[in-house]
């Protein structure tokens, strides 16, 4: 069933701009999953350029597809307060829109394999699901086993080859941030971790530990505070660290939000950043540039994570098997360390 809202001249114009055949334009507008993602993107960009919007209802009726991809974020990870997830979702949405698809954001608990999220995603309401960091892979494996295209942002806890994922090299990033503190002369470096039950928090902690080993310094377990990426928890943890370890001269926080909380706690105790205690964060969100002092941080390509996840999803929908991807990190040196 063709999208009747497309005239023959429109087909011709879009095909010429996209440098594809009229048949390819028709297949794209009718949701044919066999069309290569690059050609889908080219057709959608050409359609946008001439101001044409495909009839989504006609596409859904003819293909049985909804044109929706769920982005599922665990409500335990401060999804609405941390700018990180907004930037990830923006990256996902950008790629999906180029492919005539839309993002359905779901913020919900993911521990229950038979809960509301599972039932919704298994009811043909969406064409696929992109999961944020997950603590356990049970729900993901269940949905993959039922044939739903799934991509995970973050390294899965299991080594199943059926789970496609994109991630940042968090071990390298944790090493990079901590090693910088050693290089500028810090000797007693504390860390406020992320959630170590998920890969990002655990891997950044491993990087912190590796930097100690590289610099010939034994890790002091008393300088490790286990956080959850939130500002509130990090401030409490930093105050405790300062009270029990007055010789701290450096802090590596597993995200920018916690790094800013650490700075606030340090200044509340009458110490100066970076003169008395240097602080390094992780992410390089807009907060790191706006803070005073501006935050030295490990930059990861946050929108790029979302874009990579969406690109993998488009490959799955077209019948391809995407390779899992690990994105690199970069140290951004500012005033705090």
Image (cartoon, helix red, strand yellow):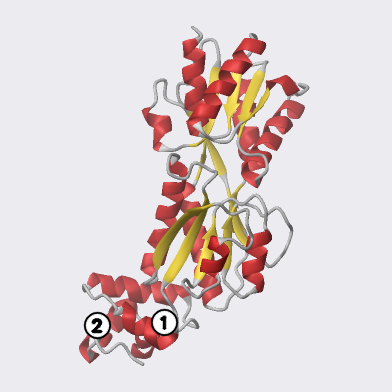
Number of numbered callouts drawn: 2
> 66 or 4: which is nearer to us?
66
Expressed as whole percent of the image width and height from the top left, the position of residue 181 reads 61, 22
Q: Is residue 38 visible?
A: yes
Residue 15 lies in what quarter of the image? bottom left
Expressed as whole percent of the image width and height from the top left, the position of residue 85 reads 46, 47
Q: Residue at horizontal 50%, vertical 17%?
A: 265
Asked if residue 244 lies left or right of residue 276, the reply is right
Q: Residue at horizontal 57%, vertical 20%?
A: 238
Q: For residue 319, which numbered disc appears in the image?
A: none
> 197 or 320: which is nearer to us?
197
Q: Secondary structure at mark 1?
A: loop
Q: Secondary structure at mark 2?
A: helix
Q: For residue 31, which numbered disc appears in the image?
A: 1
Expressed as whole percent of the image width and height from the top left, the position of residue 128 reads 51, 69
Q: Is residue 143 above or below residue 250?
A: below
Q: CA distance from mark 1 to mark 2?
A: 19 Å
> 156 or 25: which is nearer to us?
156
The residue that label 2 is drawn on is 13
């Amino acid at each position: 069933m063709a999208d009747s809202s497309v005239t023959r001249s429109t087909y011709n114009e879009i095909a010429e701009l996209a440098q594809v055949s009229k048949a390819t334009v028709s297949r794209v507008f009718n949701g044919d999953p066999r069309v290569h993602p690059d050609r889908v993107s080219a057709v959608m960009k050409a359609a946008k350029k001439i101001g044409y919007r495909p009839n989504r209802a006609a596409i859904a009726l003819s293909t049985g597809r909804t044109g929706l991809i769920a982005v599922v974020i665990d409500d335990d990870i401060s999804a609405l307060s941390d700018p990180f997830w907004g930037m990830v979702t923006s990256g996902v949405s950008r790629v999906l829109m180029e492919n005539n698809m839309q993002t359905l954001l779901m913020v919900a608990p993911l521990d229950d394999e038979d809960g509301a999220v599972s039932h919704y995603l298994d009811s043909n309401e969406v064409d696929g699901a992109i999961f944020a960091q997950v603590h356990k892979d049970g729900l993901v494996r269940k949905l993959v086993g039922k044939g739903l295209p799934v991509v995970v942002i973050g390294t899965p806890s299991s080594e199943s080859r059926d789970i496609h994922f994109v991630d940042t090299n968090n071990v390298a990033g944790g090493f990079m941030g901590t090693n910088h503190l050693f290089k500028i002369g810090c000797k007693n470096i504390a860390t406020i971790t992320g959630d170590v039950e998920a890969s990002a928090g655990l891997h950044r902690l491993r990087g912190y530990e590796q930097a100690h080993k590289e610099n010939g310094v034994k890790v002091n377990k008393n300088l490790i505070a286990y956080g959850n990426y939130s500002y509130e928890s990090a401030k409490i943890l930093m105050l405790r660290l300062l009270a029990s370890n007055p010789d701290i001269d450096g802090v590596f926080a597993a995200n920018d939000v916690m790094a800013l909380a650490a700075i606030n706690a340090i200044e509340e105790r009458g110490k100066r950043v970076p003169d008395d205690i240097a602080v390094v964060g992780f992410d390089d969100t807009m907060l790191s540039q706006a803070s005073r002092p501006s935050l030295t941080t490990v930059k990861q390509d946050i929108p790029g994570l979302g874009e990579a996840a969406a690109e993998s999803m488009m490959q799955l929908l077209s019948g391809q098997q995407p390779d899992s991807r690990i994105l690199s990190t970069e140290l951004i040196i500012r005033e705090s360390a």
